[in-house]
């Protein structure tokens, strides 16, 4: 299917430039809100530019998920939850457009108003807004949701709540939040917290719920059937309140049924797709895409192969080193581990060298650090921290590049030299410290990912060449979550998707305050005044120059800190799907991202 993606991609620079350079609108109720400037869509917009308002309703989508689940409450730390639930069942005051860097449009709220410096934000609820049981969404529900999520909910919600000076009803359908810190993004974050039904949780311990209570929400889909660890089925609510009320949802939520089938490993999941038990499958391995997607359903035309581009940052995908562990507290050791990782050989083995490597946290976007020494505002922002950050954060850092051979002589030699600088030498074939204690560590992997296992198998062989023999622990998804929540690992797989509008989530990913909070997302355990300062700058930047400089400086600090061994990036999505499953011709700039599949897809035989 042809798309208008590249037309959308060309809009990014213009949209970002206009938004970043604009001043904030005068405080008055608005239909939407942007991080900078005004929303691209006017107050009378009919639908999102990437949605099809004429799409028919009906049909189903069935996807294969590797792993398991033991909870249906995605808003707490306890349990393992299908990640899609947060996006498919819950709703917030406002909803995010996938076609603008950071713009929200009214959903449960019909309007938003901010103070002149965004020191407060006020929302007016739609009179029509209803929970799935037909009861109205009230200001009391909103206030209870923010207080509950901010105190006993998942840690991802705590940071925002800590920046609230007050939350109060200012009318029958209006609620105002006042902030205790300068942070331009807070007015937007206030609009995207899930709203739950207060009355459902009376006499129930919210933080301890699991499969016993299904949170009542106002979203278009409800959980209709499930078997723990086996499958989860969601059904479209024909009485969903938002149809014909909210322009944002016009053309969305067309499929009657969304079913998630869970499998123990990738092989079983792929076989289920081949025989038709699953009708949509994302493929991340280009070599597999090119060699194994030739089965009968594809050759017969019953399954379509769609390749979809996007313009969002690469994010970081790879193997994170836990700096809380003594083995990885020394940057020279982390650097050695990166040199020992023979990416070019691994990439050839896994993808036929078809996937480019992630070169920084924001690569594939205008926000990425530039090659060579820091200059201009980037250098100015980094200079006060010159004595406490890696020197090449300023002078320039790039990942090592091997010659593609299995032995990787240059990388091995560099790793040995770095380990020696850190106080380790090879003694009788074993890397050890001055007292003869062997250097070793544990790599934690979740079962089911044959790709990660294959990469680690090759990495272990490379490490053995420098006298290091790590232990590889393969656990199920529940154990993996429990251990990573407690930071009980030395090295593990990590994926952090990043957007074109980095904000407060950066504090969760690598801010000092989140470094030791159980269940946090700062897996590397980094605590850096420089990183904290760059995050603060990008949150408070008044201009395009400062915002870009702060983000690029942050990228330099994260990349040169050698916290993660990056693997390859995906600048396109590959989705194989039933020929009767369709998506609009116009792709948003975020591409295949939460909010796109299954939201804008539809089922139509033809």
Image (tube, grey):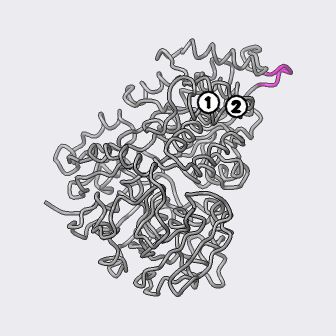
Q: CA distance from mark 2 to mark 1?
A: 9 Å
Q: Nearer the viewer's eye, disc 2 or disc 1?
A: 2
Farthest residue in the left direction? 606
* Residue plotted at (74% across, 38% down): 325
Q: Position of residue 246 (x, y in %)?
A: 35, 74
Q: Is residue 304 left or right of residue 364?
A: left
Q: Is residue 380 left or right of residue 355?
A: right
Q: Could you say which disc has been placed on residue 155 in the image?
A: none
Q: State which region is magenta.
A: 433-438
Instruction: Please say if the residues under marks 2 and 1 sit with CB atoms less than 8 Å apart.
Output: yes
Whether residue 261 appears in this view of the structure is no
Q: Position of residue 511 (x, y in %)?
A: 66, 47
Determine whether 108 is above or below 446 in the image.
below
Q: Could you say which disc has been placed on residue 560 in the image?
A: 1
Q: Position of residue 240 (x, y in %)?
A: 36, 79
Whether residue 180 appears in this view of the structure is yes
Q: Could you say which disc has been placed on residue 389 in the image?
A: 2
Instruction: Tell me which numbered mark, 2 or 1, is placed earlier along the sequence.
Output: 2
Q: Secondary structure at mark 1?
A: helix
Determine whether 146 is above or below 463 in the image.
below
Determine whether 82 is above or below 236 in the image.
above
* Residue plotted at (48% across, 39% down): 367
How many marks can you see?
A: 2
């Amino acid at each position: 299917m042809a798309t208008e993606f590249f037309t959308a991609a060309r809009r990014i620079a213009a949209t970002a430039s206009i938004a970043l350079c604009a001043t904030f609108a005068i405080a008055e109720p608005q239909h939407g809100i942007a991080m900078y400037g005004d929303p691209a869509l006017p107050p009378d917009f009919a639908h999102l530019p990437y949605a099809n308002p004429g799409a028919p309703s009906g049909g189903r989508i069935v996807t294969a998920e590797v792993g398991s689940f033991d909870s249906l409450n995605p808003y707490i730390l306890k349990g393992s939850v299908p990640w899609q639930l947060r996006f498919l069942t819950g709703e917030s005051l406002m909803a995010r457009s996938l076609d603008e860097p950071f713009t929200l449009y009214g959903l449960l709220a019909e309007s938003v108003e901010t103070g002149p410096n965004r020191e407060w934000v006020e929302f007016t609820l739609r009179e029509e807004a209803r929970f799935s049981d037909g009861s109205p969404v009230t200001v009391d529900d909103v206030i209870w949701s923010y207080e509950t999520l901010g105190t006993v909910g998942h840690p991802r919600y705590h940071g925002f709540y800590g920046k609230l000076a007050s939350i109060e009803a200012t009318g029958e359908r209006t609620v105002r939040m006042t902030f205790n810190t300068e942070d331009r993004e807070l007015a937007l974050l206030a609009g995207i917290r899930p709203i739950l039904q207060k009355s459902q949780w009376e006499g129930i311990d919210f933080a301890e719920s699991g499969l016993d209570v299904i949170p009542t929400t106002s979203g278009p889909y409800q959980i209709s059937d499930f078997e723990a660890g086996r499958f989860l089925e969601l059904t479209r609510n024909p009485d969903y309140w938002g149809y014909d009320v909210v322009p944002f949802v016009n053309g969305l939520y067309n499929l009657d049924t969304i079913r998630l089938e869970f499998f123990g490993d990738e092989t079983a999941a792929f076989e289920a797709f081949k025989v038709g038990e699953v009708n949509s499958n994302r493929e991340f391995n280009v070599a597999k895409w090119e060699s194994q997607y030739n089965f009968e359903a594809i050759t017969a035309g019953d399954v379509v192969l769609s390749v979809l581009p996007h313009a969002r940052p690469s994010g970081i995908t790879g193997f994170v080193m836990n700096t809380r562990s003594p083995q990885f507290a020394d940057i020279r050791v982390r650097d050695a581990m990166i040199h020992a990782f023979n990416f070019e050989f691994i990439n050839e083995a896994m993808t036929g060298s078809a996937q480019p490597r992630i070169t920084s946290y924001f690569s594939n976007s205008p926000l990425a650090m530039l090659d060579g020494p820091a200059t201009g505002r980037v250098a100015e922002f980094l200079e006060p921290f010159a004595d406490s950050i890696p020197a090449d954060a300023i002078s320039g850092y790039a990942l090592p590049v091997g010659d593609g051979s299995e032995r990787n002589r240059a990388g091995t030699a560099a790793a040995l030299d770095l380990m020696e600088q850190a106080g380790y030498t090879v003694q009788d074939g074993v890397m050890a410290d001055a007292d003869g204690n062997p250097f070793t560590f544990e790599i934690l992997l979740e079962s089911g990912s044959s790709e990660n296992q294959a990469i680690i198998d090759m990495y272990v062989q490379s490490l053995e060449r420098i006298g290091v023999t790590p232990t590889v622990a393969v656990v199920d998804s529940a154990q993996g979550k429990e251990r990573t929540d407690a930071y009980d690992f030395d090295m593990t797989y990590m994926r952090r998707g990043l957007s074109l509008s980095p904000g407060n989530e950066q504090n969760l990913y690598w801010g000092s305050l989140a470094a030791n909070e159980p269940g946090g997302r700062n897996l590397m355990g980094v605590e850096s005044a420089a990183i904290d300062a760059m995050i603060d700058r990008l949150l408070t930047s008044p201009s395009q120059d400062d915002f870009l400089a702060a983000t690029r400086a942050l990228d330099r600090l994260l990349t040169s800190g050698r916290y993660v061994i990056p693997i390859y990036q995906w600048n396109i999505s590959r989705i194989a799907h039933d020929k009767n499953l369709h998506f609009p011709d116009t792709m948003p700039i975020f591409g295949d991202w939460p909010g796109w599949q299954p939201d804008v897809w539809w089922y139509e035989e033809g």
